[in-house]
Amino acid sequence: MSEENLSEYSGDILKIANNLKHFGRMTDPTGSARIKGPCGDEIEFYLVINDGIIEDVKFYTDGCIATKVCGSMAARLATGKTIEDALSISPKQVMDSLQGLPKDHCHCSILAVSALYRAIADYLLKI
Ligand code: FES
């Protein structure tokens, strides 16, 4: 991956990136997915779902700062939600929750939310 231009990010975004919540992998999730965006970045989502409630979420990516903060926000928004409510989380909601994210990184929020949806689908196809 090429060197990232940090000057395009606001201080708030860099603060979130330096203290990422939900970052990491899970060894025994009830649903998981890994997808690659057109930019080549990959993101993984891992879920623990119990009685229709998403109890725990982790994500992992080697992508850009925007992908990391979008993954973190999507994970935060999904934690504690029902499957139905989590499926109503939108890339716009992720963007709106991350004030200062450069608009040209909108696709990073789409990548994060798509991985979340796929991990939910993985769970639903197994039950
Ligand atoms: Fe690839 Fe962010 S630049 S998803």
Image: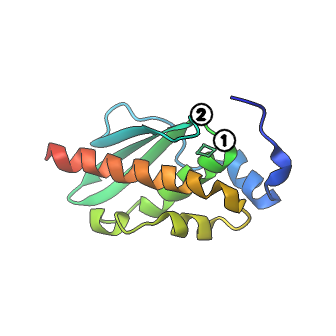
Q: Residues within 10 Å of mark 1 (few under 14, many from 20)?
A: some
**What residue sits right under mark 1 in the picture?**
64
What residue appears at the point 34 percent right and 48 percent down from the top-left corner? 118
What residue appears at the point 34 percent right and 40 percent down from the top-left corner? 32
Rendered location of residue 15, percent (x, y): 75, 53
**Mark 1 element type:** loop
Label number found at residue 62:
2
Toward the front, the furthest residue is 38
How many numbered discs sit on the rendered protein?
2
Mark 1: amino acid: Cys
Q: Is residue 50 left or right of residue 35?
A: left
Rendered location of residue 90, percent (x, y): 46, 66
Place residue 126 in its image quadrant.
top left
Q: Is mark 1 within 8 Å of ligand 1?
A: yes
The answer to which of 23 and 74 lies nearer the viewer is 74
Mark 2: amino acid: Asp
The answer to which of 104 and 112 lies nearer the viewer is 104
The answer to which of 99 and 107 lies nearer the viewer is 107
What residue appears at the point 29 percent right and 43 percent down from the top-left corner? 31
The answer to which of 30 and 119 lies nearer the viewer is 119
